[in-house]
Image (tube, helix red, strand yellow):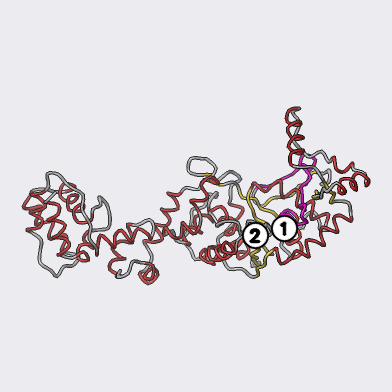
Amino acid sequence: MKLRFAPSPTGMLHVGNARLAIANALFARRHGGKFQLRIDDTDIGRSKESHVEAIRTDLTWLGITWDETFRQTERLDRYAKAIERLKATGRLYPCFESEQELAAKRETQIRQRRAPVYDRAMLKMTPEQRAQAEANGKVPYWRFRLSDSIVQWRDLVMGNCQVKLPSVSDPVLVRTDGTVLYTLASVVDDLETDITHIIRGEDHVTNTGVQIDIAEALGARPDHFRFAHLPLLLDENGGKLSKRFDAMSLRTLRQDGVESEALVAYLARLGSSDDPVLLPFAEQADVYDLSHISKSAARFDTRQLLGLNHKYLGQLPFRAVADRLPEGSTEAFWLAIRGNIDMLSEARLWHTVTYGDIVPPPQEDVASFLKDAADLLPPEPWDTTTWKNWTAALKEKTGLSGKALFLPLRLALTGEEHGPELRDLLPLIGRERVLTRLLAGQNH
C-alpha cells in the first residue's frame, strides 16, 4: 500500500490541505504502507520555492513524515513520453480554438439549454486544415479524447460512485507551449511510483473518472487505484470554508498558538461520529478509520478546535512549552495559567498581567473597597494560602461576599473579568504590583 499528498507550491497550506495530508498519512501508517510527498510544481509561473519550504515545515509540524519525495519538474521527460504514447494511439488530439471561440460555443449551448460540453469539432479537422492553421501561426493545445463509457468504482467513503464520461468535456492535457497539465502528470506519477490508494476531496469525483480513463489509456487496469473522497468542509454557518481559507493557514494557526496534536486530532475525526482523541501522530494512526467518515459535508467549527486545544494545553507539562513561553516564565506561572487559555499565544497577556505593568479599568464606587483591600494586604512572603486569608479578612471588614467581593479585586489586579485562579497568580504578581494596582484603582 502506498499513498501520497501532492500539494502545489502556489500558496500556504490551509486546514483543507491539512485534512487531506493527515488522512493520507494516517491511513498509510495504519496499514503499514508508505507515504509519498509529491510537489506539484508544473505551474512554473505561480510556484515558489518559499512555499515548498513552508509545505515541508507545516507537514513536519503536524507530525507527518514521508518515505519519499520528489517534484514534478524533475519528471518532465516521463510526461513527454506519456504524451507521445497518447498521441500515437489517437487519444490526444490537437485543438486550435481560442478562449473567445470556446466561450461563444458554451454560451450558445447554454442558450439552447444543452450541457456546455466540448463538441470535439477539432476531431473533424483534415490534415490539410491543420497544416493551414499552423501555417497561419496557430499553435495547438492537446485534448484527451475520453471514452464513451460510464466509469464506476467503489469509494472507501462515498460508496458506489460513477462518472458519465460523455457528459464531461475532453480535458486539455498539454498547453500550447508544450507543458503538461496536472491531470495527466498526476496519473503518470501515480502509475509509475506505485501509488495504490488516493484520498482526496469530494470536489475531485469527476476528475477521478477522467483520470481512471487516462490511466487505462496508458495501460492500467480500471481498478488499478482505490479511491476515497472526503466530503466538503463547511464553516460554522454551513457556508463554504474555502472563502475563509486564507485565515486558516497552518502558519497562522501555529503562530496563534494552536497545537499540532489538537489540530490533527480534530481533523482526523472531522465528519465522523467519533470524538477526537488527543494522541501522538503514531498512536492517532492506530485508531484512524476511514469507514467512520460520513458522506455528508463536515463543518469546521473553530470553537470545537479551540476547545480541544484548551484541553490539550491544560495537560501539558512545563518542559513541553518552556521554550515557547515569554522570557522569564516559570513553571509556577505555567501551571497557574494553562487551564485558562485556549491558545498558547494568550500566555503573553497573562505574562504581562503577572510580571509587567497594566492599567486596570476604572471601577466606579469601589474606591473605598480597594483602599480597605490595600490596608489589609498581608506582608510577604506569599503562598497559595495568601488569597484565601486576605479575602476572608476583607469580607469580614466590608461585609461583601461572592461576586461583589471578588470581581473588583480581579479587575483591579488583572484587568480581566475572568482568568486563572488568583490563589495561584497572587504570589507570582507580588505585593508591590498588587499594591500599585489597588492604589491605581482608587484614583479612577
Identify which residue, 240 or 339, lies in the foreground. Answer: 240
The residue that appears at 49% across and 66% down in the rendered structure is 280
Which residue in the protein does label 1 denote? 186
| Three-letter amino acid code at the position of disc 2 | Ala
**Amino acid type at mark 1:** Ser
Above or below: residue 107 compared with residue 149: above
User: What residue do we see at 86% from left, 58% from top?
Assistant: 85
- Relative depth, front residue between 44 and 302: 44
Q: Secondary structure at mark 2?
A: loop
Give the mark nearer the N terminus: 1 vs 2. Answer: 2
Q: Is residue 400 above or below residue 284?
A: above
Is 239 or 244 nearer to us in this picture? 244
**Marks 1 & 2, CB-CB < 8 Å contact:** yes
What residue sits 23% from the left and 56% below the top?
Answer: 414
Query: Are there few (<14), some (14-19), or many (20+) residues within 10 Å of tag 2?
Result: many
Find disc 2 in the rendering and name its residue. Answer: 6
